[in-house]
Amino acid sequence: MDITESDLPGVGKKHEIDIGGDKRLVIVTHNTGKRQLFLKDGPDADSEELFELSDQLARTVGTILEGAYFQPVASESVETMLAEGTLLEWYAIGDDSPLVGETLRSADVAHRTGVTVVAIQREEEVLSDTLAETELRAGDTLVAVGDRESCDQFEDLLTGDA
């Protein structure tokens, strides 16, 4: 996926996202938080404004798009960028994961991968206390924070590829 970012002095930032077929989605984020979305039909075409969103509405739409409200397809992991280089990811523990029956402490997850697991979702319950000593089960979803390399290492550990 090709994304370009450019500064707009006195305005904010512009992101252009290649969405295929010579089309680009252009998002202008104003310093005020307002977002404008444009569609550019070709490399030399003018951009057509699609709509404008307030800061709060843009954040709400963003969380919906990232899947925070609903995950339409079963996925092994979901990723959210917290800050430059810091990810918040959700990982499903499969039946064949080597972490089933382990605790975060016994598997030495933090030391081996560099991620911090901040919550475990088990069915309808979210566990956040004594995580290091909680025995992991198939079907659990782990919420982890780390940089890209740490998250990749954690996913390898989780799937047995480490």
Image: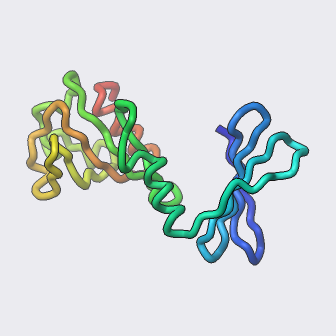
Please identify the residue farthest to the right as the structure is shown. Answer: 44
Q: Nearer the viewer, residue 84 or 81?
A: 81
Residue 65: tell me if it is visible: yes
Quadrant including the N terminus: top right
Please give left or right for residue 92 compared with residue 102 in the image: right
Total number of numbered discs in the rendering = 0
Residue 4: tell me if it is visible: no
Residue 150: percent from left, percent from top = 39, 45
Q: Nearer the viewer, residue 22 or 149?
A: 22
- For the rendered model, the colour scheme is rainbow
Q: Residue at x 65, y 75 (%)?
A: 31
Please give left or right for residue 11 compared with residue 75 in the image: right
Quadrant including the C terminus: top left
Q: Residue at x 30, y 33 (%)?
A: 157
Q: Residue at x 16, y 56 (%)?
A: 128
Residue 95: percent from left, percent from top = 19, 24
Please give left or right for residue 43 compared with residue 97 in the image: right
Please give left or right for residue 158 compared with residue 46 in the image: left
Q: Residue at x 59, y 72 (%)?
A: 33
Residue 2: percent from left, percent from top = 69, 41
Please identify the residue farthest to the top as the structure is shown. Answer: 96
Residue 93: percent from left, percent from top = 24, 33
Q: Nearer the viewer, residue 137 or 14?
A: 14
Q: Is residue 133 above or below residue 73?
A: below
